[in-house]
């Protein structure tokens, strides 16, 4: 697995993801407290790539991690975002 991006490169990638996702949580549509979530966690081999990142608000980000702990996988997070809100990006 490739090492993590350096902080400047990761900041650029984070900004690209936020722009791609229209500065909205892709789960609930919130414009506040936005964070970038790895669909496949870094600890499980997830890479710092746009296709592995999604914009979530702090609350939904916390829920996504809680869901993972109780057995939901990334397709559940993606599927829920797609079904719940029109802001989900298909990229």
Image: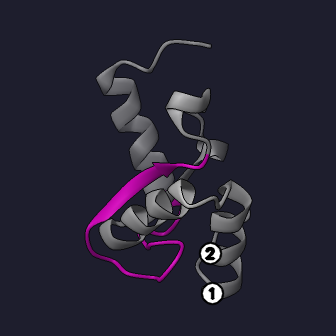
Q: Residue at x 33, y 77 (%)?
A: 31
SS state under label 2:
helix
Question: Can the viewer see residue 91 in this picture?
Answer: no
Find residue 83 and report its image quarter. bottom right
Residue 6 sits inside the magenta stretch? no
Contact between labelled residues 2 and 1, with CB atoms less than 8 Å apart: yes
Q: Looking at this rendering, what residue extends furthest in the left direction?
A: 33
- The image shows residue 46 at horizontal and vertical percentages of 60, 32
Q: Residue at x 58, y 12 (%)?
A: 2
Circle 1 sits on which residue? 84
Neighbourhood count class around disc 1 (C-alpha, 10 Å): few under 14, some 14–19, many 20 upward: some
Neighbourhood count class around disc 2 (C-alpha, 10 Å): few under 14, some 14–19, many 20 upward: many
| Cα distance in 3D space between marks 1 and 2 | 5 Å
Q: Any mark on residue 81, and which?
A: 2
The quarter of the rendered structure image containing the C terminus is: bottom right
Q: Which residues are magenta?
A: 19-39
SS state under label 1:
helix
Question: Can the viewer see residue 48 in this picture?
Answer: yes
75 or 88, nearer to the observer: 75
Residue 37 sits inside the magenta stretch? yes
Q: Any mark on residue 19, and which?
A: none
65 or 21, nearer to the observer: 65
Vertical comparison of 33 with 29: above or below: above
Q: Residue at x 49, y 12 (%)?
A: 3
Left or right: 1, with 13 as reference point:
right
Left or right: 59, with 65 as reference point:
left
- The image shows residue 13 at horizontal and vertical percentages of 46, 38
- The image shows residue 60 at horizontal and vertical percentages of 42, 71
């Amino acid at each position: 697995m490739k090492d993590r991006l350096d902080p400047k490169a990761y900041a650029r990638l984070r900004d690209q993801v936020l722009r791609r996702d229209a500065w909205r949580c892709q789960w609930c549509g919130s414009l506040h407290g936005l964070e970038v979530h790895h669909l496949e966690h870094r600890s499980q081999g997830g890479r710092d790539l746009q296709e592995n990142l999604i914009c979530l608000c702090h609350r939904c980000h916390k829920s996504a991690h809680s869901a993972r702990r109780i057995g939901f996988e990334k397709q559940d997070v993606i599927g829920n975002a797609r079904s719940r809100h029109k802001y989900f990006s298909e990229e």
